Amino acid sequence: MTDAAQGGTDAGERVQHLVIMGVAGSGKTTLATLLERRLGWPYAEADEFHPQANIDKMSAGTPLDDDDRGPWLGAIRDWLTAQTRAGRSSLVTCSALKASYRDVLRAAEGDVHFVHLTAPPELIEERMTRRTGHFMPPTLLPSQLRTLQPLGDGEDGVTIVVDVPPEEVADRTVAAFGLRPARPQG
């Protein structure tokens, strides 16, 4: 890829956005943090875009519905567009469980690509049980798995199994999109 894959753009180059998607506990934040360091792209957690009512609902063990997700997805799309207008490629984590949710994100300016992280449900549940300080309880995993629509034909993205160390997941992601590490800051 060109400089657009490194976070900056040359005249006429398109900005790239990676939406790191999957159910809770699939490793979205871990991958985004690794890619942020490697690529030098700004990164946002989709959880930061949830209104308090959504957080309260999930904390109580109640799954979100499409009405809850609409404004949240719109805010993420708008953040991606703002990055494009600033000439920056970016990373965002977002469950993006349904194709219709990804359609909202895909409407952002710039080129939006999806990285679907997946693993056996038992592994994801184990990860969710071990983590602390997150509002999403493991009891909502079955609901997310039922809602999940894997990337379909024609959707710009890759599916990566996360049953390997996080650095290898990052390697696979970088290779899948032909990305290059950020230039050293000097």
Image: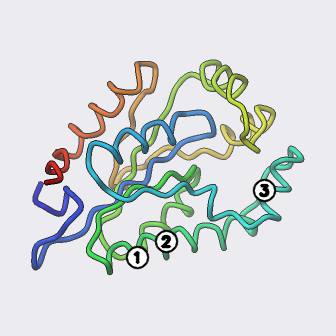
For the residues labelled 1 and 3, say whether their Cβ atoms are less than 8 Å apart: no
Q: CA distance from mark 2 to mark 3?
A: 19 Å
The amino acid type found where label 2 is placed reads: Arg
Label 3 sits on residue: 55
What x and y, as percent, mark residue 32? Answer: 43, 44
User: Tag 3, which secondary structure?
Assistant: helix
Task: Please state which of residues 38 and 46 is positioned toward the viewer in this rendering.
Answer: 38
* Mark before the other along the chain sequence, 2 or 3: 3
Relative height, residue 157 to residue 104 (above, below): above
* Mark before the other along the chain sequence, 1 or 3: 3
Task: Please state which of residues 9 and 177 is positioned toward the viewer in this rendering.
Answer: 9
> Which residue appears farthest toward the front when viewing the image?
186
User: Tag 1, which secondary structure?
Assistant: helix
- The quarter of the picture where the C terminus appears is bottom left
- Residue for point 61% across, 33% down: 25
Mark 1: few/some/many CA within 10 Å (<14, 14-19, 20+)? many
Q: CA distance from mark 1 to mark 3?
A: 24 Å
Label 2 sits on residue: 77
Question: In the shown orientation, is residue 10 left or right of residue 68?
Answer: left
What x and y, as percent, mark residue 12? Answer: 11, 78
Label 1 sits on residue: 81
The amino acid type found where label 3 is placed reads: Ile
Question: In the shown orientation, is residue 149 left or right of residue 168?
Answer: right
The amino acid type found where label 1 is placed reads: Thr
What x and y, as percent, mark residue 157? Answer: 34, 49
Mark 3: few/some/many CA within 10 Å (<14, 14-19, 20+)? some
For the residues labelled 2 and 1, say whether their Cβ atoms are less than 8 Å apart: yes
